[in-house]
Image (spheres, rainbow, N blue to C red):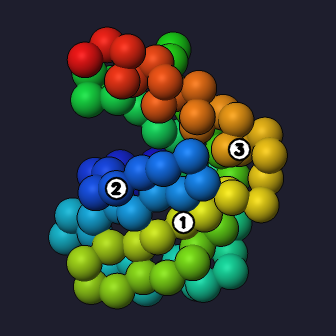
Amino acid sequence: MLQLPVRNISRGGVLVGAAGEDLSSFAVGESHTVMIVDAAGDLDAAAHVAGRVIRHDAGGMALSWDEDADGVRTVGAFLDRFYSKR
């Protein structure tokens, strides 16, 4: 499992930082299982979605699930829970 920091997230996708990892093996268009957890690492409240690689560079990688209604709903519920804790 590869853990990467979230730089930006929305209901339809995420931009993760490279954190020193070489992300060139993640080809644009490939799908990968993504688990999103809050800063506390609460695995019980994690969101699981299939993300499609949109782009990557030395600084990070963007994945999208905006064409998957279930993915948008799942991450939306995660974000609603996350922001309600603040």
Q: Residue type at mark 3: give it.
A: Gly
Q: Which residue is mark 1?
A: 63
Residue at horizontal 68%, vertical 44%?
Answer: 72
Q: Is residue 67 left or right of residue 49?
A: right
Q: Residues within 10 Å of mark 1 (few under 14, many from 20)?
A: many
Residue at horizontal 47%, vertical 39%?
Answer: 36
Q: Which residue is mark 3?
A: 71
Asked if 74 appears above or below 30 in the picture, the reply is above
**Quadrant location of residue 58?**
bottom left
Q: What is the residue that sits farthest to the left in this orientation?
A: 20
Q: Is residue 62 left or right of residue 6?
A: right
Asked if 17 appears above or below 4 in the picture, the reply is below
Q: Residue type at mark 1: give it.
A: Leu
Q: Earlier in the sequence, mark 3 or mark 2?
A: 2
Residue 52 locus on image (x, y percent):
65, 68
**Quadrant location of residue 47?**
top right
Asked if 35 appears above or below 17 in the picture, the reply is above
Q: Earlier in the sequence, mark 3 or mark 1?
A: 1
Residue 27 locus on image (x, y percent):
58, 84
Mark 3 and mark 1 in contact? Answer it, CB < 8 Å.
no
Q: Earlier in the sequence, mark 2 or mark 1?
A: 2
Residue 53 is at least partly visible in this image = yes
Q: Is residue 74 left or right of residue 10?
A: right
Look at the numbered disc 1 and give the secondary structure of its residue. strand
Q: Which residue is mark 2?
A: 8
Residue 80 locus on image (x, y percent):
49, 24
Q: Is residue 61 left or right of residue 5?
A: right
Real-space CA distance between mark 3 and mark 2, rounded to the nearest whole angstrom: 16 Å
Image quadrant occupied by the C terminus: top left
Q: Residues within 10 Å of mark 2 (few under 14, many from 20)?
A: few
**Quadrant location of residue 7?**
bottom left
Look at the numbered disc 3 and give the secondary structure of its residue. helix
